[in-house]
Amino acid sequence: MGQTASANAPSNLSYTSETDVMIAYDKRAVRSVSTPELTSYRANIKGKALNDPVTKAELVDLLRLHGINDTLSTLLFNFFQTLSNFPMIKDCYENVTYVGVLKSCVLVSKQRCLKYVRDKSYNHVKLIFIALALSKNVKEVTGTPSSDISLDVPDIISGFNNVQTDELTIPADSMLEFVTLMLRISMLTLTKNSTLDVKLSEKWDSFRTFALNIVRTMNTSIVTSQDTLKHVIAYEDFQEVVSSTCPNLLLPLEMLVEHVLFLERDLKEPPASNIPMAESKLVTAPLLSQLSTFWPRELVFSKLQKLYVGRDNGFSMRSFQAKVFKWMAPSLLLVNGIRIPDDDEYARSKNHRYQNFLNDYPRLRGEDQQLLPPFAGKKKLLFAVYVAEPWKVTNSELFGDTKTTIIQLSPVQEIFKASRPENICFNTLGGGIGVGSSIPVIKNSNRRYMPGNVSLNIDPNLEFGTFRNVGPGGSISPGSLTTASSEHKFLIQDIEVWGCGGEKELEEQMKNWEWEEAEAKRRQRINLKSINDDRALLELAGLVGQNQSGGSV
């Protein structure tokens, strides 16, 4: 509804000035949204004209981002200023206007963006990075084409107006605030018309702790949050992390900008029934938000069922089995602990039981390890394992299908997917739990672990764990980011198992969310029966006819 034929016209028009290009693409942005969406947007800007300038405070208010800090609001304002100058993102330095904000919202939404630029292969992540990194504070001197030279707009778009991304970086502290925002609003933007009626600064530091894991993944020289003040994030690292490790990281941003296309009365509370009511030491809103950067949100923000919590049920294989094995649907195994930096010293002076574990577990030679800075010392390690099949005892054979996935959540985030089935061990004869390993060899009182190249192993007392990553060749594939071989042994602090719905339940959940969005669109159309002519709406917006203004609209 609300689309005009000109929105799909070929983009071979001739432009001889940047101003012509800007006006044309401002108009196209307006035509890229439906009549109800544009009318709702005009209501949200409270009588302002589309070519009126927008202040930073007005932008934050329009996005309904109540309570964000100044660093983040400045970053977002610069972000919108860059996008509002699209496609001349390098050459034009026009102020942010309300039509520029609308254009930015179209560009942030990947689906709308690809249709808007008319290029299905367009690198949307690259555009987002440029908008976050490119400063519009100091105007560069650029040549202005003479009037008889036609600008090649498709080439300008595909080449990002000749912006050199290898010369751009984002301050790591700014990236930390941005990623924190993505995690903070993830649960609040399950549908495009979810309200944001919450003070975002509440629990900000908790979300920031988990966001730091993602930022460290983009730059492994970063260890603490203070280190972000002296480091930057490069484009290649950002692109790699978003594409392989955090494919859903930008989804909350896409959902956020859709809010400006809904009237306040059409916004609804986030689907509370889909948010887990029970929490634990490990299962918190920040943790679930970090998980949602990789796993589908309908999986993470579903009605998770608490099956086993070591702190409550006891750290034993028998208790684990009694609580978990009756669950006939997929589950999440969560385990965290403190890395043991010196095996011999810890076994000698801290915990004598650890020596028995060292005797049973084949060591990775020190010269074969390449320790990244975030792992040095006694660091917190956190892992989640997606188990698609019901748990079973595997004293003689393994279980687990190709959906088995290990996700390392702290101190960095990396994904390790199964390369073949039969990849999980639950050995009640003294072998413990293994993901990606073979069944331990147990003869009399002797035990020998058989760790895979990429594997997570837990001893039978649920006291010690190891994570090994030495390359391909096992039932779990290496991640795409870390090429260095490493192994980390840790003292387990928490281990939990949470049940999640099967494919049928998750599909039903997704349908419910889609229905909520469809209902919001239906209400918009009902409210706007009296407006059904696109051209009349454009004239009201001052984009065509006698009210058209110059400049960038």
Image (cartoon, rainbow, N blue to C red):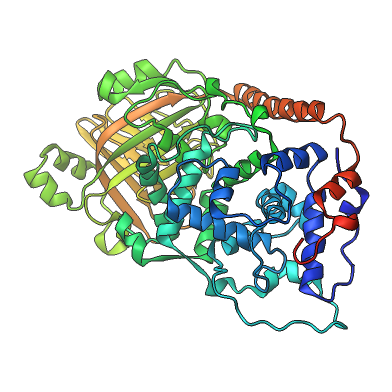
- Screen quadrant of the C terminus: bottom right
Residue 144 occupies which quadrant of the picture? bottom right
- Screen quadrant of the N terminus: top right
From this viewpoint, is residue 183 visible?
yes
Q: Residue at left 65%, top 60%? A: 83
The vertical placement of 357 against 94, above or below, is above
In the rendered image, residue 328, in percent from the top left (x then y), is placed at: 51, 18
Q: Is residue 257 left or right of residue 464?
A: right
In the rendered image, residue 244, in percent from the top left (x then y), is placed at: 54, 52
Q: Residue at left 73%, top 43%? A: 42
From this viewpoint, is residue 480 visible?
no
Q: Residue at left 59%, top 61%? A: 131
The vertical placement of 491 against 281, above or below, is below
Residue 353 occupies which quadrant of the picture? top left
In the rendered image, residue 401, in percent from the top left (x then y), is placed at: 54, 34
Q: Is residue 198 left or right of residue 271?
A: left
Point out the residue furthest to the left here: 349
In the rendered image, residue 102, in percent from the top left (x then y), is placed at: 70, 50
Q: Residue at left 87%, top 49%? A: 539
Q: Nearer the viewer, residue 545 or 10?
A: 545
